[in-house]
């Protein structure tokens, strides 16, 4: 009896066909949920355990669940599915398997393909990456988004709805392995492209040049000097270095992703002037620029004005040298000279140094003098130097005084000579002896005799007195003639005087009455004149 029971328990139930069935969709898309349900016929048998199989291999699901699900189906989930179950009725147990069901998982969108505008770009050139794929026509409404990667790092802003990514400039360090990914907006399906290698080519630097970039105009002492080193071509990180010819040492160095770089020298001094050059290197042989001469101009200092006089004092008529010199300042320098802030003149010094301005002094040149130096970087004025021109006013007064004194002396000398003539003629006339009387024909009235006769010629006139007086007495006159003028005395006297030697001094001396004619009395006032 027991043996029969065991045979019944393990006896196959083949006679009950399709007692156990598997319900499953025959077609699903990637990312969809794949539901499996194992069912038995309605009878008194009670399911004890259920197992699911795919292509003959048991799937890992709970053994007492009649309905299972694969939440995100993948292409790999396609295959033959079936289920099996053990059942029990009273004391009898049995095992039954379903028929196999084929399930196909359809591709929602194909695997993306990464395309590159250039797999061998030149440094600095742009590159466009494209992730090519599209949803199945049966699911054309599916939204996709994309992301690009280089060496495992996302590029750009990450995930985007655009299947393209443009890299504006590629550099040598951008070389590497690139790929892209595409996924649904619901994040149910994600696919990755194959990796592609991009090799960025470097361009050697060429046509290196050096110039003064800023500030514009001359380099002024104390200002900033900016040297710009640039290349016409060259890619990647370029190392720029600046050098001074005199020392052959580097005065600056920069490495950057650009075709130019600046070197700023703050508070430049005159000692910074000289010849400079720069070099550029991006991994190939360094290239050097031509020499650039840097001239540093310095403003003029306050000039010094010096007055160089020929003597201890400035006198009218002297020439004074005004020397102006600025001890510092780049040439050319223009000097201006001032007298009481009025411009006297200007002189240029093309090579620097000082200049001189000569001034012939007059009475008006007394006052304050100054000079100004200007080389285009700001004019500077000297200290004021005073000048006192002496002798100008005294000299005029002395000349007037001398002339007045000369006139007075001349007049006094003439009067003295006339008085002496009168005195000596009177003295000699009174002391003449008798033998001199016959010279006058009339004797008693010489005036009438003279008027009666004709005047002798000038050549026949004989001097009445020649060097009269003792030897030790100063000679007042050399020759004196005693002439009685006729009635036309004015004309006759003029004629005689005009015919005499110009070296002889003539004077009309009125003769006084001799004492003997007056009978020893004192002449009256009328007679004296």
Image (cartoon, rainbow, N blue to C red):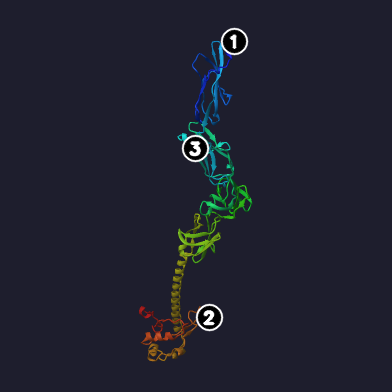
Residue drawn at point x = 53 percent, y = 51 percent: 213
Q: In which quarter of the image is the N terminus?
A: top right
Q: Distance between the residues labelled 3 and 2?
A: 158 Å
Q: Do the residues labelled 3 and 2 touch (CB within 8 Å)?
A: no
Q: With respect to residue 74, does 218 lie above or below?
A: below
Residue placed under numbered mark 2 in the picture? 471
Q: How crowded is mark 2: few (under 14 residues within 10 Å), some or many (20 or more)?
A: few
Residue 176 placement (x, y as % from top left): 59, 41
Tell me which numbered mark, 2 or 1, is placed earlier along the sequence: 1
> Which mark is in front, 3 or 2?
3
Q: How crowded is mark 1: few (under 14 residues within 10 Å), some or many (20 or more)?
A: few
Q: Distance between the residues labelled 1 and 3?
A: 65 Å
Return the residue nearer the eye: 405 or 10.
Answer: 10
Residue drawn at point x = 58 percent, y = 13 percent: 9
Residue 10 placement (x, y as % from top left): 59, 14
Residue placed under numbered mark 1 in the picture? 4
Residue placed under numbered mark 3 in the picture? 134
- Write down the quadrant of residue 308 in the picture: bottom right
């Amino acid at each position: 009896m027991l043996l029969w029971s065991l045979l019944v328990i393990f006896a196959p139930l083949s006679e009950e066909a399709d007692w156990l069935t598997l319900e499953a969709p025959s077609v699903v898309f990637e990312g969809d949920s794949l539901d499996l349900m194992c069912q038995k016929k309605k009878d008194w048998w009670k399911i004890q355990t259920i197992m699911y199989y795919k292509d003959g291999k048991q799937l890992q699901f709970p053994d007492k669940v009649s309905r299972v699900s694969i939440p995100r189906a993948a292409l790999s989930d396609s295959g033959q599915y079936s289920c099996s179950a053990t059942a029990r009725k009273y004391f009898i147990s049995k095992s039954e398997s379903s028929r196999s069901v084929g399930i196909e998982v359809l591709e929602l969108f194909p695997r993306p393909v990464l395309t590159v505008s250039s797999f061998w770009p030149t440094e600095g050139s742009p590159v466009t990456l494209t992730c090519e794929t599209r949803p199945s026509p049966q699911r054309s409404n599916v939204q996709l988004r994309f992301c690009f990667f280089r060496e495992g790092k996302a590029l750009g802003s990450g995930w985007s709805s655009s299947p393209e990514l443009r890299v504006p400039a590629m550099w040598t360090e951008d070389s590497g392995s690139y790929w892209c990914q595409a996924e649904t907006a619901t994040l149910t399906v994600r696919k990755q492209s194959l990796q592609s290698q991009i090799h960025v080519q470097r361009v050697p630097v060429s046509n290196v040049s050096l110039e003064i970039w800023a500030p514009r105009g001359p380099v002024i002492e104390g200002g900033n000097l900016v040297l710009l080193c640039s290349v016409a071509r060259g890619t990647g990180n370029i190392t720029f270095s600046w050098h001074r010819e005199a020392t052959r040492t580097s005065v600056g160095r920069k490495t950057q992703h650009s075709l130019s770089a600046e070197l700023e020298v703050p508070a430049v001094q005159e000692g910074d002037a000289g010849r400079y050059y720069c070099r550029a290197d991006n991994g190939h042989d360094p290239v050097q620029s031509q020499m650039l001469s840097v001239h540093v101009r310095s403003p003029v200092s306050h000039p010094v004005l010096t007055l160089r006089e020929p003597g201890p004092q400035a006198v009218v008529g002297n020439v004074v040298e005004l020397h102006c010199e600025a001890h510092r300042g780049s040439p050319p320098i223009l000097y201006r000279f001032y007298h009481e802030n009025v411009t006297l003149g200007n002189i240029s010094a093309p090579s620097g140094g000082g200049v001189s301005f000569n001034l012939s002094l007059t009475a008006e040149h007394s006052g304050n003098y100054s000079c100004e130096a200007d080389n285009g970087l700001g004019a500077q004025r000297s200290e004021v130097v005073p000048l006192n021109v002496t002798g100008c006013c005294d000299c005029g007064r002395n000349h007037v005084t001398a002339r007045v004194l000369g006139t007075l002396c001349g007049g006094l000398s003439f009067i003295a000579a006339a008085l002496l003539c009168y005195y000596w003629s009177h003295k000699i006339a009174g002391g003449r002896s008798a033998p001199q009387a016959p010279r006058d024909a009339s004797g008693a009235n010489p005036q009438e005799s003279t008027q009666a006769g004709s005047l002798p010629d000038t050549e026949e006139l004989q001097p009445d007195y020649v060097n009269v007086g003792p030897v030790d007495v100063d000679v007042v006159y050399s020759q004196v003639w005693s002439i009685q003028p006729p009635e036309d005395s004015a004309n006759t006297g003029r004629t005689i005087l005009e015919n005499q030697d110009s070296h002889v001094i003539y004077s009309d001396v009125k003769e006084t009455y001799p004492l003997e004619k007056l009978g020893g009395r004192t002449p009256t006032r009328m007679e004296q004149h």
